[in-house]
Image (cartoon, rainbow, N blue to C red):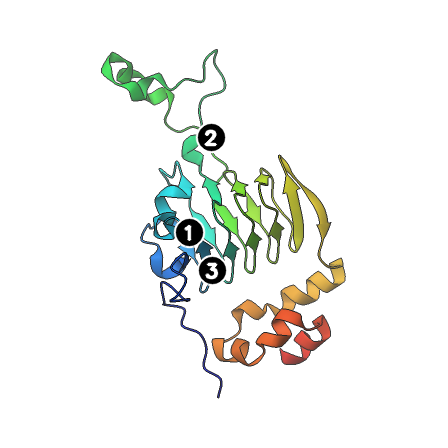
Amino acid sequence: MPVPADPTALHPMPDQPRVVLLKPLITSPLIEAGEFSYYDDPDDPTAFETRNVLYHYGPEKLVIGKFCALGEGVRFIMNGANHRLDGPSTFPFPIMGGSWAEHFDLITGLPGRGDTVVGNDVWLGYRAMVMPGVHIGHGAIIASGAVVVDDVPDYGIVGGNPARLLRRRYSDADIDRLLAVAWWDWPFERITEHVRTIMSGSIDDLDRCA
């Protein structure tokens, strides 16, 4: 019987230390990642939590689904990056200390956009940036260098700054079928058995495997 790959291996490709699986890497309770989602970086991929998830002071979470591919330099900007916009200056004086710290209430409780959520089977290209509170649908593709400021639909392809929807990978009817199949939730043994169909088969083929 085919043997599934190991979802607990930090480096799934031993000869490529630039690739790490996120689930066994992450320690922050504010970040979640599903099995086999990986980050690729020739510098230090194990620093993902501090170098790629920025201004993460909570309580909002970053949730990444299963089987996602994150290219080098992908960044998630979290709600902690927010500054006040309702006064003449956006500068956060209280964090500088001294008597300015007495006004810390001016920078706490700023409005946020909630959790940032990446669906399953999402590909984020080189140096894509995802802004706070964005929801990216299953099967989406984020082009290299894109700055994602709004939600991305299932199986959408977005690019640019700000990112816009370039097209959807399938028709609405076929997307509904793919979401119903939800191959990413299959047991690993079944995924292993049908890898070729998942990667290169038709939706009809995938339906038959389901």
Q: Residue at x 45, y 61 (%)?
A: 34
Q: What amino acid is at disc 3?
A: Ser
Q: Residue furthest bottom?
A: 1
For the residues carrying marks 2 and 1, which lies nearer the camera in this image? 1
185 above or below 99? Answer: below
Per the model, the C-alpha gap separating discs 2 and 3 is: 30 Å
Label 2–label 3 contact, CB within 8 A: no
- Residue 171 sits in which quadrant? bottom right
Q: Which residue is mark 2?
A: 111
The residue carrying pointer 1 sits among few (fewer than 14), some (14 to 19) or many (20 or more) residues within 10 Å by Cα, namely: few
Q: Which residue is mark 3?
A: 37
Label 2–label 1 contact, CB within 8 A: no
Q: What amino acid is at disc 2?
A: Pro
Q: What amino acid is at disc 1?
A: Pro
N-terminal-most mark, 2 or 3: 3
- Residue 179 sits in which quadrant? bottom right
Secondary structure beneath disc 2? loop
For the residues carrying marks 2 and 3, which lies nearer the camera in this image? 3
Q: Position of residue 31 (x, y in %)?
A: 39, 50
N-terminal-most mark, 2 or 1: 1
Q: Which residue is mark 1?
A: 42
124 above or below 112? Answer: below
Compared across the picture, whether 109 is left or right of 100 comes to right
Q: Position of residue 174 (x, y in %)?
A: 73, 64
Compared across the picture, whether 204 is left or right of 48 comes to right
Secondary structure beneath disc 3? loop
